[in-house]
Image (cartoon, rainbow, N blue to C red):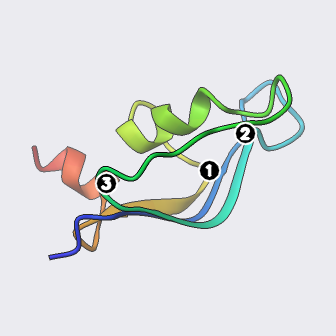
Amino acid sequence: MDDALHIEVLRYRYPVSDRDVVSIGELTLAPGEPALLTGHPGRGKPTLPYLIAGLIYPDAGLVRRHGTALRVLLIHI
């Protein structure tokens, strides 16, 4: 079973903003694999974990684990 976290074309924009604060084409993170988020202030570094955790929903794209979108997994918990 694929335990990796797959992010596919993820985009998020705060309602008061005129630009995306998160824009990722494709990203795969294996369990235990370290990840480092870097970037300029206001570019969505804290927002990405919120999207992955399902605390906020993306404007576009999917976060998948075990081949299933996390939004679907959260609904069925």
Q: Please give the residue where the numbered disc 1 appears in the rendered image.
A: 59
Q: Earlier in the sequence, mark 1 or mark 2?
A: 2
Answer left or right for 47 relative to 32. right
Residue ranking furthest to the right = 18
Q: Earlier in the sequence, mark 3 or mark 2?
A: 2
Q: Residue 38 sits in which quadrant?
A: top right
Q: Is residue 12 above or below residue 56?
A: below
**Circle 1/circle 2 CB separation < 8 Å:** yes
Q: Is residue 74 above or below residue 66?
A: above
Q: Which amino acid, by three-letter code, is at mark 1?
A: Asp
Q: Residue at x 27, y 74 (%)?
A: 67
Q: Which amino acid, by three-letter code, is at mark 3?
A: Leu
Badge 2 local density, few (<14 within 10 Å), some, or many (20+)? some
Q: Is residue 53 above or below residue 8?
A: above
Q: Which mark is residue 67?
A: none
Q: Is residue 31 above or below residue 41?
A: below
Q: Residue at x 49, y 40 (%)?
A: 51
| Residue 24 percent location from the top left of the image | 67, 59
Answer left or right for 33 relative to 44. left
Residue ranking furthest to the left = 77
Q: Which amino acid, by three-letter code, is at mark 2?
A: Arg
Count up the numbered dots.
3
Q: Look at the numbered disc 2 and give the secondary structure of its residue.
A: loop
Q: Please give the residue where the numbered disc 2 appears in the rendered image.
A: 13
Q: Please give the residue where the numbered disc 3 appears in the rendered image.
A: 70
| Residue 22 percent location from the top left of the image | 70, 45
Q: Residue at x 37, y 37 (%)?
A: 53
- Mark 1 vs mark 3, foreground winner is 3
Q: Residue at x 26, y 57 (%)?
A: 72
